[in-house]
Image (cartoon, coloured by chain):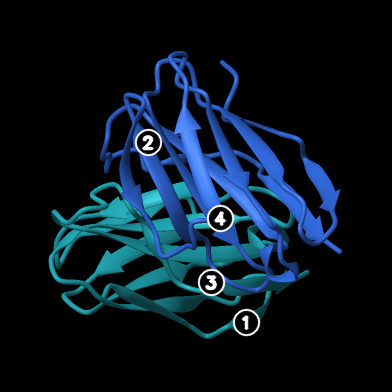
Amino acid sequence: EDQVTQSPEALRLQEGESSSLNCSYTVSGLRGLFWYRQDPGKGPEFLFTLYSAGEEKEKERLKATLTKKESFLHITAPKPEDSATYLCAVQAEGGTSYGKLTFGQGTILTVHP
Amino acid sequence: DAGVTQSPTHLIKTRGQHVTLRCSPISGHKSVSWYQQVLGQGPQFIFQYYEKEERGRGNFPDRFSARQFPNYSSELNVNALLLGDSALYLCASSLMYSTLNYGYTFGSGTRLTVV
């Protein structure tokens, strides 16, 4: 069974204090790993898809990397508006639920001014 | 263009009742998926429909059912509601059955409270 574990559960940073969020995954065959951002009371907002180990993607202050067992979301010089829950999800190759995403529990990021 | 639209936004039901949640995907998107998100947890897959056919089902009891209409909108039905069904129900749409580059676009969800 596909599994995704995110750490830490919550992270408090000062504005400008860079850090990383971790996503460890177990999947029979990885088709894609997704990062989403979720604000309170809203649906998840797509950030990145990573396909293979060694791949990196960047968007503003965010950079996502992927290895064969985990992914990191690096946040450089965060601002208060980066405060949100960050969700990691995997999509497996094949199977009866081909389009299914398996999510981790999320990391709640709070950035203080 | 409008994003994924879900209705209602909030709903309060009594144990044992039935509920219907609705989702309109982005125009042109043919796939709709439903997820349940309990407070403090990540979304959990319930169903996926593509071209009006069920293509995937998560580990949920038969009290949960769904369908997709010719215009690609979708309904999620839950019978015999339990307190544990209280959650945010999310609908996600995509152009194809399985998409990678642009992910799945989620609606803002329906907050269901069972009392």
Contact check, label 2 and label 1, Cβ < 8 Å: no
Upstream in sequence: badge 1 or badge 3: 1
Chain where mark 4 sits: B
* Mark sitting on residue A106: 3
CA distance for labels 2 and 4: 17 Å
Q: Name the residue under label 4.
A: B63
Is A55 positioned to the left or the right of A15 in the image?
A: left
A39 in relation to A106, above or below: above
Q: Mark 2 points at which residue?
A: B49
Residue type at numbered disc 2: Tyr
Residue type at numbered disc 1: Ala
Residue A85 versus residue B16: which sits nearer the camera? Answer: B16
In the rendering, what colour is chain A?
cyan
The mark lying in front, picked from 3 and 2, is 2
Q: Which residue is drawn at 56% across and 67% down?
A: A77
Counting from the top left corner in percent of width and height, residue A98 is at: 23, 49
Residue A104 versus residue B7: which sits nearer the camera? Answer: B7
Counting from the top left corner in percent of width and height, residue B62 is at: 49, 56
Image quarter of residue A12: bottom right
Q: Residue at x 16, y 75 (%)?
A: A68
The mark lying in front, picked from 1 and 3, is 3
Chain where mark 2 sits: B
Residue B84 versus residue A52: which sits nearer the camera? Answer: B84
Chain where mark 1 sits: A
SS for dot 4: loop
CA distance for labels 3 and 4: 27 Å
Are the numbered discs 2 and 1 placed on the same chain, yes or no? no
Are the numbered discs 1 and 4 placed on the same chain, yes or no? no
Is A82 positioned to the left or the right of B27 in the image?
A: right
CA distance for labels 3 and 2: 26 Å
